[in-house]
Structures are given as structure tokens and as C-alpha cells.
Image: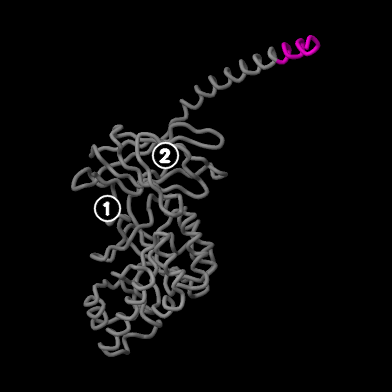
Amino acid sequence: MSRLFPRTALWSRRLRAALAVLATAVAMCGVVLAATSTPSSAATCNGYVGLTFDDGPTGSTGALLNVLRSNGVRATMFNVGQNVQNNRSPAQAQVSAGMWVANHSWNHAHMTSMSQSQMQSDLSQTSSAIQSATGSRPVLFRPPYGETNSTLQSVASSLGMRQVLWDVDSQDWNGASVSQIVSNASRLQAGQVILMHDGIQNTRDAIPQIVANLTSRNLCPGMISPSTGRAVAPDGTTPPPDGGTPPPTGGSCTATATTTNVWGDRYNTSVTVSGATTWTVVVALTSPQRVSTIWNGTATWDSSGTVMTMRSNGSGNTFGFTTMTNGNSSARPQIRSCTSG
């Protein structure tokens, strides 16, 4: 015992010295971190676009859903009825992943050459197959090849569906390269819809770049309104015509995000809500980032783990969270919507 004591005492002195150095470093770091408080880039969605994928489900639907989830994207899937009947599991996976399912005819025929009764049978059969497989009955319809007429539109309307075409054609069906698909998608403006397809590798590879471009322009993927056929927020609200932040009236509010502290492997975000005392804020992360800690709110997550819905819990109008970068240190959270109540 007496032989070990000097070593123990020496070890204790070295430990105290190391802790003193560490405390000094932490204190210095705290000064630096406090000075790095900057507004989060792309913190607010100034408009929404509709990302749509035709002709599924296919054998590649699972791969497409993985890419969409990893990029925090919800999209509209225009499904072919025959494919749904033969591939019920991927059709169900679409809904489980938070996608919206829509009608794209029974077998992708040229429908304008059909009689009204044939159109009625085709679309009705397709909607029934989708509802049977997914539990959701379509409220949107896209005619194959974009071919339509007043009779077809009337039939779709009688079945509770709005016809939706597209503003931008990705040309993925025409052999477009990844860079061409990304370039075509970069033309999207708020409220517009882009045509893409399930089962195309180049399309899947283009999605991260498409999302990055949208983020740089403060645009976010949204749902397609069955009332207007235009892209709106995932909760169905429509941004103002000038593309600005919705005013704090009529059930909406404003959420402003600020990056308050940044470390090597994580960062803190503070979100301040104005225009409501009780609120729900939807925040999207960029994969593989993940939230590790939250405060002053109650959070739930979608199936991808990248879209967080934060609700007020009586702790005031400012909440926050710590995000682990997991190798992606440049991305910052996007605020997709803010609603009162």
C-alpha cells in the first residue's frame, strides 16, 4: 500500500491539472460560441411546390421512398390501378411514408378515345383499388400522357377528384440525365407542380440536388390542393400571393429560427413564434441530421425521423432543439409551417 500511494498522489495532481486546463478551454469556447449566433439560412418556406411521381407502384418504389424520406420530402404519387392491385405492399408503404396517393388510370391507356362510361369505369376501378390497398381514396387525378378533354374532367369531378397536370416536365421519361432533371426542376416556382416518374434511377439520384435547390430558394415540397390544383403547405394552408410569410391571422402564425450555438458535431436552434400563444410548428431536417434534445415544446415525428411537429406546452413562445450533424454540418432546419391552436 505504501508503495502505491506516491503514484496515486501523482495521478491525482495530474488529473487536477488536466481538469483545470479543460475548464479554461470550455470557458473560452463558451465565449466563442456566444459570438456565433446567426440567423438560420432557409429557415422559412416562402412557397411550396408539388413533387409528383407517376406510374407506380413499381419494384423500385421502396428505393424511391427511402430517398424521399432521407431528404425530408413528402410527394404525390399518381398510381396506376393495375399496378396497385399487383403491388399492394409498396402502395401501402407510400401512405406509411407520408406520401399522398392519387389516381393515374387503370392501365395508362389513351383515355380520350374512351366513351364516358368507359372513363367512369376505369377511374372508379382505380380509385377503389387504391382505397382497398392504402385506406385512402384519391382526390386527385392525372390523365395518362396529359391527354384530357371536358368529358374526362367531368367524369373525374363526379368521382370527387380534381384533374392535375404539371407546370414543369422533368423529362425523366425521355432519358434525361441526373443533371438535366435537376436543371429542369430548378425552374419550379411557388405553387407549381413537376412531373417525375417512379422506377427511374436518374430521378432518384436527382432528388437530393432538387431539394437542395429548393431550399436555397426558400421553397419547400408541399401537397397539391384538391380545390385549386396548386401546391400548398402540407397542412393544406396556402401561402400569400406575394410569397411572404403568412400573417398571424386566420389560424396562422410566424415562426423564426435562429442558429444559436455551433459545435463540431451538433448545433442548437431557437425558434420564436409570434401571432399565437398556442401553436404547432412543423420543422424539417436534412438527413442524416437528427434532433437529440428539445426544450419548451412537445415533439412528434414522421416515419422518416426528419420532420418534427412541435406543439406548445405552456412554456412560452420560444422553443429549441439540439441537432446532431452526423457528417452534414452545413444544412440547417427548415420551418415548413406555423399554425395557431
Judge left or right: residue 186 versus residue 240: right
Q: In this view of the protein, which residue sits in the foreground, 201 or 167?
A: 201
Task: Tell me the element at label 1.
Answer: loop
- Residue at 46 percent of width and 26 percent of height: 35
- Is residue 284 a member of the stretch shown in magenta? no
The quadrant of the picture occupied by the C terminus is top left
Q: Is residue 133 above or below residue 49?
A: below
Magenta span of residues: 1-11
Residue that mark 1 sits on: 239
Secondary structure mostly seen in magenta is: helix
- Residue at 34 percent of width and 39 percent of height: 256
**Place of residue 123 in the rendered image (x, y in percent of width and height, measured from the top left):** 31, 80
Can see residue 137? yes
Q: Amino acid at mark 2?
A: Ser
- Residue at 62 percent of width and 18 percent of height: 19
Residue with the most extreme left position: 250
**Place of residue 274 in the rendered image (x, y in percent of width and height, measured from the top left):** 26, 37
Q: Which mark is residue 40?
A: 2
Q: Residues within 10 Å of mark 1 (few under 14, many from 20)?
A: many
